[in-house]
Amino acid sequence: MAAGNSLRALLLAAVLSAGAASWTALAHEPGPRWDALTPEQKTILAPAQKDWDNLTPLQRKRLLNAAKHYPSLTPAEQARFEARIPAWTHLPREERETARKNFKQFHRLPPEKKAEVKSRWRADHPEAASTPPPPAVSPTPAPAPAAQ
């Protein structure tokens, strides 16, 4: 009986280590190169083309997932997507994670709280009153001009 349990434990350990090794290899793959994308993906992700080679595998994966949903967006949402890709790809990882966290928190709010947040955001950003607020990211202050 003990030998059977030991054998099961050994087999389980072998399976888990093989799975972990393949997962680790996948996590470090650079993802598809720009020239390996489909024509549709290239069209949708064109604003990220010049940065594609410098993106992390996770960024490439997320952009490819976003590209899958692009056709279902309204024309205004598509325009916003295209305009924001370059800025998004240049954000530091920490700021992207903060934006994702804030986005998730916002979407968990009840409708009346969402309306309140949107109202406050529009009051603070009158120039963008006709567009929904972007994911909340703490703005990075612009560097002070160098004293001469």
Image: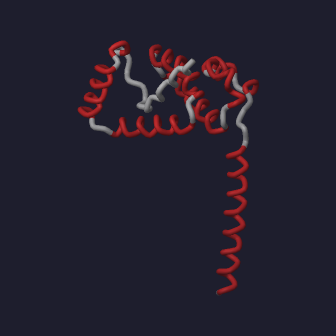
Image-based side of 67 in relation to 132, left or right:
right
In this view, the residue in front, 124 or 99, is 124
Image-based side of 127 in relation to 16, left or right:
left
Residue beneath the point at 49% across and 24% down: 142
Q: Residue furthest front?
A: 148
Residue beneath the point at 67% across and 25% down: 51
Residue 61 position, x and y percent, is 62, 35
Residue 122 position, x and y percent, is 31, 20
Image-based side of 76 in relation to 19, left or right:
left
Q: Is residue 28 above or below residue 119?
A: below
Residue 22 position, x and y percent, is 72, 53
Which corner quadrant of the image does residue 90 belong to? top right
Q: Is residue 55 above or below residue 125?
A: below
Residue beneath the point at 44% across and 32% down: 137
Residue beneath the point at 72% across and 56% down: 21
Q: Is residue 68 visible?
A: no
In this view, the residue in front, 122 or 81, is 122
Q: Is residue 20 above or below residue 5?
A: above
